[in-house]
Amino acid sequence: MKIAIASGKGGTGKTFVSVNLAYSLEKNVKLLDCDVEEPNSNIFLKGDFISKQQSSLLVPKLINDLCDGCRICQNVCQFNAIVVLAKKAMVFEDLCHACGFCTLACPQKALYEVEHKIGEVTHFQKGAIELIEGRLDVGKALAVPVIRDVKSNIKLNETVIIDSPPGTSCPMVWAVQESDLVILVAESTPFGLHDFKLALESVNEMKIPCAVIINKDGLGDNRLEKYCQNENIKILGKIPYDRKIATSYSHGAILVKEDKFYDQQFKQIWKEIENFIKEASFEK
Amino acid sequence: LKNNNIKELVVLSGKGGTGKTTITAAIASLVDSLVLADCDVDAADLHLLTQPKIIEQNKFIEGKEAIVNLDKCTGCGLCASMCRFDAFKQLDDGLYSVVEVKCEGCGLCVHYCSEKAIDFVDRDCGIWMISETRFGTMVHARLKPAGENSGLLVSLVRKEARKIAQKEGKKLILVDGPPGIGCPVISSVTGSSAVLLVTESTLSALHDLSRVAQLAQNFEVPVYVVINRADINIEVSEAIKKECEKLKVNFVGMIPFDKQIVNSQLAGQSVIEYISTETKNIIKDIWERVWTTM
């Protein structure tokens, strides 16, 4: 079972929900922190370090003597990442998308590929939770390859929770695709509802079953809940706006660990998730 | 030619949901002469507070995408084996098609397909608009759901905002930025006059703030920091202040949690327009500190 936690708007509680779901399951679970631009899960989990791998792109490198300045590499590159200056090709690694086209196309075989580091993937363990965190290096543009490296750790028949990046574009798409269920964490404010609808559109585009957890319930209005009811979108649970939660979150605590009431609530959300996935696969 | 009299302030945060758009709209209420740019192109919210009247709308066509012509495809699978982005899926009849959201638009498959069965077409990535608002002209955009090229759309929105600022003789371009530190954030920061980081008193926000502050400093852009909802955790707020000293960035103030801020959003107004509490004066002071030193 692969569950992606996403949102559209930032700061609605993706990491909060991901970590507390993982913790309240009390079974082996893999938590993938795919918000690689700003990974926060381990601030809460404080897992023991297990191992670390580099995340890199295969970028072209020039063998100077072989280049005759023919410009074929420059012409095939869609990303302006390789340019011929003074009759020699020059690579701009930070623009390169690592498609491999230039290296294949070079008639002089003057290009070969080397690894260019853009981030790290780190494994942590905390009890039954294995956390795999992706972390984009500051100054690097492409989050998707790091997300792909994190997700390459998914094995068959595991319970996996994916803490996704905010937004509705490529990083979010790569994080949630091929999940069995996307849970959108949303708050019922005008910004929250607006961005929730955008995220919903993206998830529907990918044809993945989708359900909602309403967070900070009571802050704002009730338009989100009404919208979900009208559109027949399953609400898996509602977490109230509670200063106690805000404080616990602010200093990096895991809510369900210190609060029995919310632990029960997250266990109930798990039941709702299991029922929802059963029904969704039955409908297929 | 770049007009150096125009300042461009980019509002960022690292972590999402800390109050970028709230602060952007508040500043917009305090400045007479500005152009607004919403560069959070895949979850734009600024229009909910500014109620723009759209005067110009354009398609955002950027880059290309591969599309298989199934009449020519023989199902050899060369495309799928060469694609670095795993963007091909095999259909039930053995032929191949492109998974649109996975296609990076590199064109490799188009070139190497032995049947010439793959077309390379312009990619429709969304729309961008120029609008009138009560604060001034606003440039904003809407990326297609699950869309590509958000970084290039950000660059375009900023470029158009600058053109308008020059034409209208405005002093400030105020940019509502995206969360994170990746491609759209880099596109928002490069070449701007200053960055205002809106953070909150949580350890997550502190962690994320450090990363985005370093990013701005890598591009040699001056950084200002404001803490929103600063009273949720005073200790963390103090830690953020220390971090600002360490990073040598300008700390400009703290805004308390104020439910009126949520209410102003419900009313579709900026905080400055809506509330009468002390929070309003605090935000005015913060803006003074930024504007007089920018």
Image (tube, helix red, strand yellow):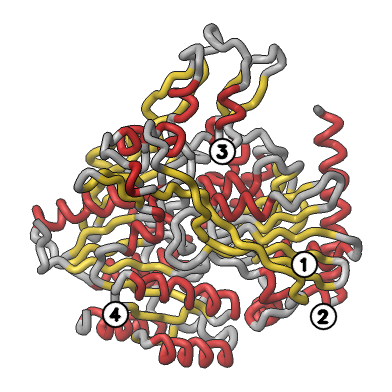
- In the figure, A145 relative to B268: above or below? above
- Spatial distance from mark 3 to mark 4, Cα to Cα? 45 Å
Q: Earlier in the sequence, mark 3 or mark 4?
A: 3
- Distance from disc 1 to disc 2, alpha carbons, whole Å, reads 11 Å
The one nearer the camera, B46 or B276, is: B46
Q: Which residue is mark 1?
A: A20
Q: Amino acid at mark 1?
A: Asn
Are there few (<14), some (14-19), or many (20+) residues within 10 Å of tag 1?
Answer: many
Q: Secondary structure at mark 3?
A: loop
Which residue is identified by label 3? B85
Q: Give the residue displayed 81% in from the left and 48% down from the top.
A: A155
Residue lying furthest top: B71
Above/below status of B207 relative to B266: below
Chain for numbered disc 3: B
Label 4: element kind? helix
Crowd band around label 2 with a 10 angstrom C-alpha radius: few (<14), some (14–19), many (20+): few
Asked if the residue under mark 2 is in contact with the one under mark 3, i.e. CB atoms within 8 Å, the reply is no
Residue B119: which quarter of the image? top left
**B172 horizontally vs B75: left or right:** left
The disc numbered 4 marks a residue on which chain?
A: B
Which residue is under mark 2?
A: A258
Inter-mark Cα distance, 1 to 3: 33 Å
Q: Residue at x 81, y 35 (%)?
A: A280
Q: Which numbered dot is residue B287?
A: 4
Give amino acid for label 2.
Glu
- The residue sitting at the front extreme is A65
